């Protein structure tokens, strides 16, 4: 293989420290492999040299691939030269691993040094968090009478100690992830005052920044603070000595910048930063709080690590920390130095301070990096793991340290991945975004010969077509052009809106894999297995058995389940065991579950599950469903979880189910699908790093996510920032963190764009460009390939796709239609019919959507003035229900509301946000015990037809059931509203009785506006009356199609939008 000049220097330089700055697609992987081989070839003792090279990779996958590549090269060497024949037999001794694996080996060999039991274990984040929570609570209890702490809690309005514990935990985690020193952070607290010389420099800087605003016409001469400038604002500042006067003048500037609409946000933040950094020097009165917080964090760290050492339970972050501590022992350090003569680190831009210290310990003598044996490779532009603790400054300081140690700096710019068109676009875009921090890429002449395609985007900002559907259709178009599914990657920043995309791909039968999905425990195949375990745990759990029988394990139809429910028996399991019919699926389910039940207390969960999967031929069933490979790998991963649990914890099913409940609160990735599967690659941008695809489609590109802040901010350069009333230091540190976060998002976009080899595609979904979309359009002179027409799908293809094998055919676990036939309506339709038959006809018979805000307001007394909310009543109600359904306990409510409003293009709608916040807080006030099921769909059979609907919330507590319906109406006349919704709750209660054999203990209406919760008691007479009225309604609707049979209401009103049809 031929290398360019820069690559060859990196490969051949083995006697000096080397730092390779490798742009995207510049061939760093090949350099690592061939440098490794070159070290072996240059040695008189190849076998010993091969095992003396320590190579650290970022992921296990990268480790595996590197070992495979080096193994192949060594095999070639052994064929060419007999001196290397024996190396093939020693590949297992290669020292190639992740940093965690390397550190674990060091600790395994030296655990006694730190007082750690030799049988220690590495626990997951969840278990570690439980220990941390206990330690923080103990420390806070020790300080609870401390006057400084009490004063701090009062000033910051910590009404609950738990809120303060949460802030301490967040700060502690960031400090340990980053590898910061507590006392170093405290030492950065500003001195009490600055010298006059420094002050004058500050005034000059702020004056220069404000003059630039005028030059760029961001502010006009009419602006208040510009008038102040003209009156000699900065001359006054230069002469001032009193802080209060200086602060007053600076506030004039700050306020003027704040209200100016045309100033770019980055420029505003630069001016804020200048002002805050100066005024932060005069907050010494707050030092006592900073000292206290640092003291608490130090004590938490000391006790937490001591607790883990004593219990023999370490977290992954401890592996790195304790390895550094062990290597402070010179005797042990020298042993590892002798063992490792060469050190090679991949993806160095993702290193944190503690990891860097370990590499420096191994690479230094009395002189920093004095062994001249450290090789690092990375790309600062791809540093995107700040949330995991990586510190981009590590790369920059190492670069400088290597220069000072006479090391070699190699910059790789020739791109071997992307077409010339894509390289040019990347250069134009990121030279604007990153400015002087961006080094341009060069396209390789051979790669540049491929078919040139412009960056393409679809503009659907004025279309009703959803982004997910456009992507699905584009994929079909690409496939017709000859692209394979595996050639296409759909990248996204987060999985917030992934469900809609997966549904569209399933609709068009497009296979996909998503190993980075964090919803492992919510996948259909995993939920089905959990249903099986619930049934094994309790034969009285009828709702779980219903779901299991309908799942892909048994595929029993709703009609058969309905007939099964009529058999004698105390519960569904006993009904199944009493079944004597001839339905083969039910007979098979009976035999299988009887067999599994008989061995549940005799063997491990892993063995029971393995037998169940084998007996039911579950893998064979999944093979007939789209995305079967991902599903099968997920099942195997779950089996591995049961195996580990059985080994380390317990064989009891109920304990395992409790464990799963806890695990499901933590993000868990799906199983990795290996091999050559022809499927679309769905992955986060983070997960795509190091990969490349012929076609990259950027999904949900308007979403850059939310920047979270806390009351205790931490920054390596500025130290702590603690929220105090009007604290400039806090705002300064917070602003610096915000800037770092924005820069990391720019680097995230760089990773996304540079994954593409031939085509890069994104979708413009809104008129106003926001998020990443705004940045993608920054190259003003670039000629994009704008697609105005959405790809059409041929009828033949659509017909073929309609024969779906998706699991949606077997339905949701908790949707139990009773029978199907005749006319079907909803309880809402019935209420409309009672109110006005003409309105029912127009809305439900012929589908006219004529109701506007006025009419809804009249009927529903509808809450707030929906003119001021700017959202249709029905749509607002749907949004609130969506919030309840998808509410995440681990995410701030504000963020969830903002995400939803952004999705609905209502992010600036303050009235809607306030209303949602009020409604959600009222919802969250009610504590719920038991299993909760949201949006419980049903189909209820009556004599003359069916009623369909969805119960907002079903709660199962032991053997009792509670149902609840949420209403967003403004509550003026509560009794009137209750009367209107009684029929709805009564039909819901009848549905529950039909399905589970018992009426609900409680049927409740929760009015989210007022917080009122009203019970609708079970009433046999009222229920019979309602069923009679529903049958009359269904018979009428079934018999009559003429509009004149559907009379107008005598109580018609001027707001009705259907008046023209009546007049």
Image: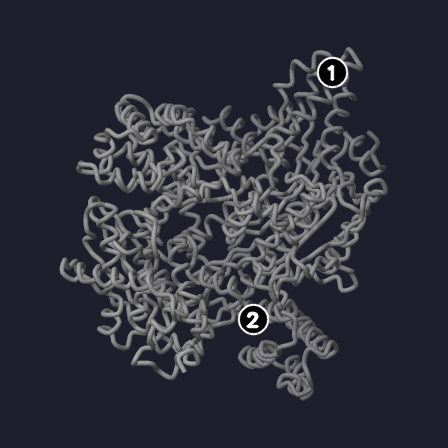
Q: Which residue is mark 1?
A: 45
- How many marks the image carries: the answer is 2
Q: Taking the image as drawn, is residue 381 in sight?
A: yes
613 relative to 355 in the view: left or right: left
Locate the N terminus and report the quarter of the image it occupies.
top right
Q: Quadrant of residue 616?
A: top left
**Element marked by disc 2:** helix
Q: Is residue 187 above or below residue 619?
A: below
180 relative to 753 in the view: left or right: left
Quick one: 7 or 495, which is closer to the camera? 495
Q: Which residue is mark 2?
A: 279
Residue 742 drawn at (x, y percent): 61, 58
Q: Quadrant of residue 83?
A: top right
State which tag comes first along the sequence, 1 or 2: 1
For the point 52% across and 50% down, which residue is it? 498
Quick one: 466 or 1037, which is closer to the camera? 1037
Q: Residues within 10 Å of mark 1 (few under 14, many from 20)?
A: few
Quick one: 843 or 143, which is closer to the camera? 843
Q: Are the residues tagged 1 and 2 within 8 Å (C-beta)?
A: no
């Amino acid at each position: 293989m031929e290398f360019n000049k820069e690559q060859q220097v990196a490969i051949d330089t083995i006697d000096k420290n080397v730092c390779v700055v490798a742009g995207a697609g510049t061939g760093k992987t090949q350099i690592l492999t061939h440098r490794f081989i070159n070290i072996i070839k240059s040695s008189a003792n190849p076998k010993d040299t091969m095992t003396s090279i320590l190579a650290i990779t970022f992921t296990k996958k990268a480790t595996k691939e590197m070992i495979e590549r080096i193994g192949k090269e060594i095999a070639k060497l052994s064929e060419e030269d007999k001196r290397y024949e024996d190396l093939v037999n020693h590949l297992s001794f290669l020292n190639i691993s992740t940093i965690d694996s390397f550190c674990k080996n060091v600790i395994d060999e030296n655990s006694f040094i730190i007082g750690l039991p030799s049988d220690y274990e590495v626990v997951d984040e969840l278990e570690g968090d439980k220990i941390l929570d206990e330690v923080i609570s103990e420390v806070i209890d020790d300080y609870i009478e401390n006057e400084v702490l009490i004063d701090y809690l009062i000033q910051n309005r910590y009404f609950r100690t738990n809120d303060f514990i949460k802030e301490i935990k967040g700060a502690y985690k960031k400090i340990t992830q980053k590898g910061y020193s507590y006392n170093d952070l405290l030492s950065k607290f500003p001195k009490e005052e600055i010298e006059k010389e420094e002050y004058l420099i500050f005034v000059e800087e702020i004056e220069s920044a404000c003059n630039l605003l005028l030059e760029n016409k961001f502010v006009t001469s009419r602006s208040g603070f510009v008038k102040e400038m003209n009156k000699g604002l900065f001359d006054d500042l230069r002469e001032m000595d009193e802080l209060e006067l200086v602060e007053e003048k600076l506030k004039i500037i700050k306020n003027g910048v704040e209200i100016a609409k045309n100033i770019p946000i980055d420029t505003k933040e630069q001016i804020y930063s200048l002002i805050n950094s100066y005024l932060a020097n005069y907050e010494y009165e707050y030092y006592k709080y900073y000292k206290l917080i640092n003291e608490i964090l130090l004590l938490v760290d000391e006790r937490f690590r001591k607790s883990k050492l004593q219990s023999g339970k370490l977290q992954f972050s401890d592996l790195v920390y304790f390895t550094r501590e062990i290597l402070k022992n010179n005797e042990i350090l020298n042993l590892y130095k002798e063992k490792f003569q060469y050190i090679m680190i991949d993806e160095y831009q993702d290193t944190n301070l503690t990891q860097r210290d370990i590499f420096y310990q191994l690479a230094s003598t009395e002189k920093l990096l004095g062994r001249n044996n450290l090789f690092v490779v990375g790309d600062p532009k791809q540093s995107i793991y700040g949330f995991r603790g990586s510190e981009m400054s590590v790369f920059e300081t190492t670069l400088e340290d290597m220069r000072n140690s006479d090391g070699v700096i190699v910059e790789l710019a020739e791109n071997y991945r992307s077409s010339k068109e894509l390289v040019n676009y990347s250069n134009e875009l990121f030279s604007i975004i990153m400015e002087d921090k961006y080094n341009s890429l060069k396209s390789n002449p051979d790669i540049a010969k491929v078919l040139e395609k412009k960056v393409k985007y679809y503009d659907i900002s004025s279309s009703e077509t959803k982004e997910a559907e456009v992507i699905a259709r584009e994929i079909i178009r690409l496939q017709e052009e000859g692209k394979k599914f595996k050639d296409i990657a759909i990248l996204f920043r987060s999985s917030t809106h992934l469900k809609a995309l997966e549904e569209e791909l399933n609709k068009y039968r497009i296979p996909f894999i998503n190993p980075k999905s964090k919803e492992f425990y919510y996948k259909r195949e995993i939920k089905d297995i959990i249903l099986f375990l619930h049934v094994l745990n309790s034969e009285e759990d009828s709702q779980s058995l219903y779901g299991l029988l309908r799942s892909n394990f048994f595929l029993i139809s709703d009609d058969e389940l309905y007939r099964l429910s009529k058999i004698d028996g105390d519960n569904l399991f006993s009904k199944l065991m009493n079944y004597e019919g001839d339905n083969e699926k039910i007979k098979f389910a009976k035999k299988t579950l009887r067999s599994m039940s008989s061995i549940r207390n005799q063997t491990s969960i892993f063995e029971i599950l393995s037998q169940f999967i084998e007996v039911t031929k579950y893998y064979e069933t999944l093979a007939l469903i789209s995305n079967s490979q991902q599903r099968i790998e997920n099942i195997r991963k779950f089996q591995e979880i049961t195996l580990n649990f059985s080994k380390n914890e317990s064989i009891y099913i109920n304990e395992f189910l409790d464990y799963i409940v806890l695990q499901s609160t933590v993000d868990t990735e799906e199983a990795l699908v290996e091999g050559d599967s022809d499927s679309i690659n769905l992955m986060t941008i983070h997960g795509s790093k190091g990969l490349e695809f012929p076609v990259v489609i950027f999904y949900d590109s308007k979403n850059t996510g939310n920047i979270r802040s806390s009351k205790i901010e931490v920054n390596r350069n500025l130290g702590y920032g603690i929220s105090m009333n009007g604290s400039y230091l806090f705002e300064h540190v917070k602003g610096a963190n915000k800037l770092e976060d924005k820069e990391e998002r720019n680097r995230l976009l760089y990773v996304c764009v540079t994954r593409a080899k031939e085509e890069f595609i994104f979708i413009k979904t809104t008129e106003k460009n926001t998020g990443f979309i705004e940045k993608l359009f920054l190259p003003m002179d670039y000629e994009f390939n704008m697609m105005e027409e959405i790809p059409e799908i041929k009828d033949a293809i659509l017909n073929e796709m309609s024969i779906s094998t998706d699991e949606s055919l077997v339905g949701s676990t908790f949707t139990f239609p009773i029978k199907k036939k005749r006319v079907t309506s909803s309880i809402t339709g019935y209420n409309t019919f009672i109110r006005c038959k003409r309105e029912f006809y127009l809305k439900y018979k012929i589908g006219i959507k004529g109701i506007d805000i006025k009419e809804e307001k009249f009927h529903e007394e509808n809450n707030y003035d929906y003119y001021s909310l700017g959202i249709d009543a029905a749509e607002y109600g749907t949004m609130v229900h969506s919030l309840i359904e998808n509410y995440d306990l681990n995410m701030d409510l504000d963020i969830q509301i903002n995400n939803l409003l952004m999705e609905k293009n209502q992010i600036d709608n303050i009235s809607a946000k306030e209303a949602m916040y009020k409604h959600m807080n009222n919802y969250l006030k009610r504590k719920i015990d038991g299993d909760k099921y949201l949006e419980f769909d049903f189909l209820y059979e009556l004599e003359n037809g069916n009623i369909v609907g969805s119960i907002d919330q079903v709660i199962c507590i032991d053997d009792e059931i509670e149902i609840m319906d949420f209403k967003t109406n403004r509550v003026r006349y509560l009794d009137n509203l209750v009367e209107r919704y009684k029929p709805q709750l009564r039909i819901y209660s009848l549905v529950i009785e039909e399905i589970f054999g018992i009426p609900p203990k409680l049927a409740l209406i929760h009015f989210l506006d007022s917080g009122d919760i009203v019970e609708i008691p079970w009433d046999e007479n009222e229920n019979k009356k309602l069923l009679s009225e529903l049958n009359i309604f269904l018979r009428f609707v079934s018999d009559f199609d003429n509009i004149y049979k559907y009379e107008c209401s005598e109580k018609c009103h001027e707001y009705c939008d259907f008046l023209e049809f009546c007049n």
